[in-house]
């Protein structure tokens, strides 16, 4: 069982977005439908695995990371997909990962 917290678009109470970098988003199929249960991996600039969460039933995911260049990789029964994001400062940074077979 994954030890990650419940995934949603709503941040937990007490998160200071002025000091923390939050990468949040949704996994979607090519037709725009949410993909629940996808494994979403956070890879650093060199492609090394950093963290993994399981997307919620509505495809939502969230990571707390440092500013910099990141790759998000979603793996699911509906297919796989990557997205890049490069937050330059703390705050909430949103993205979508589209998966295809």
Image: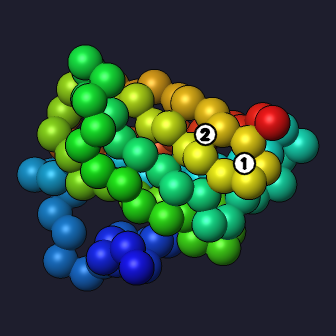
Q: Residue at x 25, y 81 (%)?
A: 13
Q: Residue furthest right?
A: 31
Side (left or right) of 58 relative to 15: right
| Quadrant where the image shows the C terminus | top right
Q: Residue at x 29, y 38 (%)?
A: 49
Asked if the residues shown at circle 1 and circle 2 are in contact, with their CB atoms under 8 angstroms apart, the answer is yes
Q: CA distance from mark 1 to mark 2?
A: 6 Å
- x, y percent for residue 2: 38, 74
- x, y percent for residue 79: 73, 42
- x, y percent for residue 37: 62, 66
| Quadrant where the image shows the N terminus | bottom left
Answer whether residue 69 is visible to the viewer in this image: no
The label number, if any, that marks residue 28 in the structure image? 1
In-front residue for pair 6/38: 38
The label number, if any, that marks residue 97 in the structure image? 2
In-front residue for pair 50/92: 50
Q: How many marks?
A: 2
- x, y percent for residue 15: 20, 69
Q: Earlier in the sequence, mark 1 or mark 2?
A: 1
Side (left or right) of 52 relative to 44: right
In-front residue for pair 96/44: 44
Side (left or right) of 71 relative to 30: left
- Callout 2: few (<14), some (14-19), or many (20+) C-alpha neighbours within 10 Å? many
């Amino acid at each position: 069982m994954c030890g990650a917290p419940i995934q949603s678009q709503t941040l937990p109470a007490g998160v200071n977005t002025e000091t923390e970098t939050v990468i949040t988003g949704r996994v979607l199929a090519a037709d725009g439908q949410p993909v629940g249960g996808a494994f979403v991996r956070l890879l650093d600039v060199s492609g090394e695995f950093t963290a993994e969460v399981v997307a919620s039933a509505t495809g939502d995911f969230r990571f707390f990371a440092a500013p910099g260049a990141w790759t998000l990789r979603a793996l699911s029964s509906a297919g796989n997909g990557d997205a890049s994001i490069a937050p330059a400062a703390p705050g909430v940074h949103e993205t979508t990962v589209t998966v295809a077979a």
